[in-house]
């Protein structure tokens, strides 16, 4: 029993203590100064832009991943082929392999001396290597790659629970394939899609390695800024303040998620 | 009465890869007829229904509705209504929206939809439940919604896939009667799939008994019961006794069978080839013979088990070769009340026997 | 299954693997520049990397941290899971809180860790690293264990108790074997999370306790050579080995 108490108090305690260690200034600075940092943040066009881009990126990646992963989730939920087992291991690989390999992989694919450019140049489609890397597109693509499985899992889980006869019932009542999907399947699977959406959004907003390495110099992204503040500018308090912003975003999302969960439990 | 059969299956087969599931089914259903597909699981009845609905296409053969081929049509283009085993009510729509779905798909004008939904709901007695969500309804109510949803579109065919499976006995029996009455009133051509023979026999105009992908016999319930065409049908429908032996002779419309329990006779139109055969008789046609009583067929047996059911008594008898047969005695024949271990003679008339040859076919 | 769907699924599988296959190809390139198509084919970098002290130490550290943090996480999470299952009322809230490390971005967590250790005056060491990793690992083990516990028929423990087992015995002989597969799955997941982790480790590693992903990360920022690819592949290989054993445990459990 003591174990139990220890069990779930421990991480909770650590987490809470962390956040105390985190406020801009860890208790050594005066309040006035800390608020000043916030003001600096809020009035800085640069940082507001960073915040905006971060949130936008989160939404874009989540939407793209949702669209890309849904058909895969449908296939996994309904197919009786043995390949689905193999495939589910496959969807885990980006996760298991770690950021390094992924980033490296995309850098090699998209770089000036990389795969796509080599392919296009060798087949004579273009003469000069394209600048595919170090821009928004490359970060988005890589993020979709990494978060793919986080979207497939909840959507697949929800789709599995949906009675397969429902689609058939819609069909025999006169709905064609498209109508059966939009009128029956989609509304019922929305739960899974929104769960996945939240997870992907959060992962994207907190992503650090990918945007840093693939985004290039001018790329503004909140988690990257935190790191920059710490390592480049040596401004600990600012870094701390930025991360508080990130926490706030996460908390908001978490509250939303809890609300959605509660609804589901009631229903 | 229309000359066109509402549904015709012509030599339908279905294989999944190398495994054949349906091996040549032909069937003709008249307008307004209620036909059941009856058989053990794996016999192909559900697959056949699925093909009629259009969720699978036959590997070969044709399906015709009123002489028009439909076997290559998508399900939404077929004019069939279907009630699924799990009811498949759309959980995110209420009862009225569920029922209205088919009408919406057919672009029925909004004004009419409300009226038709109301009518059909009252027909199946759920008019007061239209605003509810499916999960708030009992099993029986959900079933009615599923039925209403299928009927409101006024289909040519109604397909039912073991719709009563999830309900308890009493409810099931009530619903069976209600369904049958309703469908007869509407003149709805119905295909009903079930593994429960009581259900099939009590509700259908004709029953197709299926086994291993083929139809063993299609006939009215009475014919199936009294004149089963194959050993499988004889065994599957009702209770059966089989006594094995060899063909011994034939004279004047009766064939004789040499068995370890004695010589038995059964009707036969002409002489038979020698060989193994089985004599079949229903338990309720057997009597326990008193001393001196005679019967066409007699066997010596020992009482192994008795069970009293109020209106009848079930007696299990063991023959000389240790095989067992069942006798069902009506209460009226109370005279000889058997005790376990008693030796007695059971008997039945030749007319009540049927002979099945080695391939399981009935000897005419 | 419509053909278009199957093709799409196949293509997406390709999409998922392709970048990784590329890295593999590049790692076998003996040239000193990362370029495609590769200039040659040799395992040169795989052999070279063992001479690099930093790399070797990083591998050791990562293994130590990975195993310890996932093990400790299991020890903490299993009783916690039991506790959560027992109290239905408050459980959902506590459960959500204990899962919160999931939603907090790791980079924030790493920063907070850094501040925390300096605030209480501890020096960064391998233990600070392990503790940090354990805390992020706990939710993974916890979630899987709770999910498995939910499927366990409650009468199982009661049956054991009625046959004379004490609560502790019931736990060891009935509950534990039942959840073993799930726990091991959670532990292997935790191991992977720890082994590949960059954001948290980034803030709490020093030259002494550097982990493999951080070593690679430093490399990638500074020099872009094929050796980086080789080291990454080794990292993945180690994970695959761990996964392989984990799956063995799980299928043993299923059978």
Image (cartoon, rainbow, N blue to C red):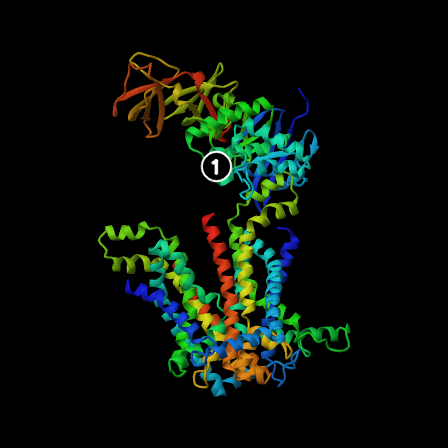
> Could you say whether the residue bearing mark 1 is in a helix, strand or loop?
loop
Measured as percent of width and height from the top left, residue A60 is found at 62, 64
Q: Residue furthest front?
A: A32
Q: Is residue B189 or residue A64 the one in the foreground?
A: A64
Q: Is residue B111 or residue A156 the one in the foreground?
A: B111
Residue occupying the point 37% across, 67% down = C74
Chain letter of disc 1 in the image? B
Residue A116 versus residue B23 in the image, above or below:
below
Q: Which residue is identified by label 1?
A: B137
Quadrant housing residue C220: bottom right
Quadrant housing residue B311: top left
Mark 1: few, some, or many residues within 10 Å (few <14, many ≥20)?
A: some
Residue A8 versus residue B209 in the image, above or below:
below
Q: Residue furthest left?
A: C164
Q: Quadrant of the N terminus of chain A?
A: bottom left
Measured as percent of width and height from the top left, residue C131 is found at 39, 75
Q: Is residue C131 or residue A206 the one in the foreground?
A: A206
Query: For this view, does C187 lie left or right of residue A232?
Result: left
Measured as percent of width and height from the top left, residue B232 is found at 48, 30
* Residue A90 visible from this viewpoint: no
Quadrant housing residue C230: bottom right
Measured as percent of width and height from the top left, residue B121 is found at 56, 30
* Residue C168 visible from this viewpoint: yes
Count of residue discs: 1
Residue occupying the point 68% across, 22% down = B3
């Amino acid at each position: 029993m003591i174990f139990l108490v220890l069990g779930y108090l421990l991480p909770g305690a650590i987490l809470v203590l962390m956040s105390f260690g985190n406020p801009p200034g860890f208790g050594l600075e005066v309040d006035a100064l800390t608020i000043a940092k916030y003001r600096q943040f809020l009035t800085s066009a640069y940082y507001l832009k960073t915040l905006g881009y971060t949130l936008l990126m989160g939404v874009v990646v989540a939407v793209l991943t949702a669209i890309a992963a849904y058909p895969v989730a449908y296939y996994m939920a309904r197919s009786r082929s043995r390949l689905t087992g193999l495939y589910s291991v496959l969807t885990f690989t980006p996760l298991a392999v770690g950021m390094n390999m992924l980033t490296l992989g995309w850098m090699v694919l998209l770089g000036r001396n990389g795969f796509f450019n080599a392919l296009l140049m060798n087949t004579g489609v273009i003469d000069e290597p394209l600048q595919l890397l170090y821009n928004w597109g490359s970060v988005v693509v890589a993020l979709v790659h990494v978060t793919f499985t986080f979207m497939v899992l909840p959507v697949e889980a929800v789709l599995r629970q949906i009675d397969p006869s429902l689609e058939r019932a819609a069909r025999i009542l006169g709905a064609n394939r498209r109508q059966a999907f939009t009128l029956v399947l989609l509304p019922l699977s929305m739960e899974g899609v929104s769960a996945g959406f939240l997870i992907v959004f959060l992962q994207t907003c907190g992503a650090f390695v990918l945007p840093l390495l693939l985004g290039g110099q001018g790329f503004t992204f909140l988690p990257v800024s935190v790191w920059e503040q710490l390592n480049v500018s040596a401004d600990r308090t600012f870094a701390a303040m930025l991360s508080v912003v990130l926490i706030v975003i996460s908390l908001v999302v978490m509250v939303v998620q809890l609300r959605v969960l509660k609804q589901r439990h009631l229903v | 009465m229309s000359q066109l059969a509402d549904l015709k299956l012509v030599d339908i087969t279905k294989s999944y890869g190398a495994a054949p599931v349906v091996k040549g089914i032909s069937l003709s259903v008249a307008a307004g007829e209620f036909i059941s597909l009856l058989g053990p699981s794996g016999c192909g009845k559900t697959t056949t229904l699925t093909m009629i609905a259009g969720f699978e296409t036959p590997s070969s053969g044709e399906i015709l509705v009123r002489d028009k081929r439909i076997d290559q049509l998508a399900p939404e283009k077929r004019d069939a209504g279907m009630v699924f085993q799990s009811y498949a009510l759309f959980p995110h729509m209420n009862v009225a929206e569920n029922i209205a779905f088919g009408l919406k798909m057919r672009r029925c004008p909004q004004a009419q939809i409300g009226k038709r939904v109301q009518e059909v709901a009252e027909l199946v007695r759920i008019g007061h439940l239209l605003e509810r969500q499916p999960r708030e309804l009992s099993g029986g109510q959900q079933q009615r919604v599923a039925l209403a949803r299928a009927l409101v579109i006024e289909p040519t065919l109604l397909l039912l896939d073991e719709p009563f499976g999830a309900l308890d006995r009493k409810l099931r029996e009530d619903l069976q009667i209600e369904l049958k009455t309703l469908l007869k009133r509407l003149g709805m051509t119905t295909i009903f799939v079930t593994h429960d023979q009581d259900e099939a026999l009590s509700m259908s105009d004709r029953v197709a008994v299926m086994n291993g992908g083929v139809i063993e016999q299609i006939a009215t319930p009475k014919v199936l019961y009294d004149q089963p065409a194959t050993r499988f049908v004889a065994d599957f429908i009702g209770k059966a006794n089989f006594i094995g032996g060899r063909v011994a002779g034939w004279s004047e419309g009766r064939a004789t069978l040499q068995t370890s329990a004695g010589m038995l006779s059964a009707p036969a139109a002409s002489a038979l080839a020698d060989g193994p055969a089985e004599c079949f008789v229903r338990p309720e046609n057997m009597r326990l013979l008193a001393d001196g009583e005679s019967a066409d067929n007699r066997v010596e047996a020992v009482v192994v088990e008795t069970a009293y059911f109020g209106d009848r008594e079930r007696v299990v008898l063991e023959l000389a070769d240790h095989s067992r047969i069942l006798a069902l005695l009506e209460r009226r024949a109370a005279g000889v009340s058997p005790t376990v271990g008693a030796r007695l003679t059971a008997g039945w008339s030749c007319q009540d026997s049927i002979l099945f040859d080695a391939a399981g076919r009935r000897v005419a | 299954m419509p053909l278009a769907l199957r093709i799409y699924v196949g293509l997406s599988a390709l999409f998922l693997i392709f970048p990784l296959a590329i890295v593999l190809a590049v790692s076998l390139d003996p040239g000193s520049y990362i370029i495609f198509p590769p200039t040659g084919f040799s395992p040169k970098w795989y052999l070279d990397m063992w001479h690099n002290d930093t790399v070797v130490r990083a591998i050791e550290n990562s293994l130590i941290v990975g195993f310890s943090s996932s093990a400790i996480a299991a020890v903490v999470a299993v009783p916690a899971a039991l506790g959560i299952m027992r109290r239905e009322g408050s459980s959902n809230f506590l459960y959500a809180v204990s899962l919160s490390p999931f939603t907090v971005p790791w980079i924030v967590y790493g920063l907070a860790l850094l501040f925390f250790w300096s605030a209480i005056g501890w020096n960064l060491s391998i233990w600070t690293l392990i503790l940090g990793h354990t805390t992020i690992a706990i939710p993974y083990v916890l979630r899987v264990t709770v999910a498995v516990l939910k499927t366990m028929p409650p009468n199982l423990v009661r049956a054991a108790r009625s046959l004379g087992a004490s609560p502790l015995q019931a736990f060891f002989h009935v509950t534990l074997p039942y959840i073993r597969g799930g726990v091991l799955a959670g532990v292997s997941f935790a191991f992977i999370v720890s082994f590949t982790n960059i954001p948290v480790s980034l803030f709490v590693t020093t030259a002494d306790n550097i982990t493999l992903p951080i070593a690679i990360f430093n490399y990638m920022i500074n020099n872009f050579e094929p050796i980086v690819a080789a080291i990454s592949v080794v990292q993945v290989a180690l994970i695959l080995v761990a996964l392989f054993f984990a799956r063995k445990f799980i299928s043993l459990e299923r059978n």
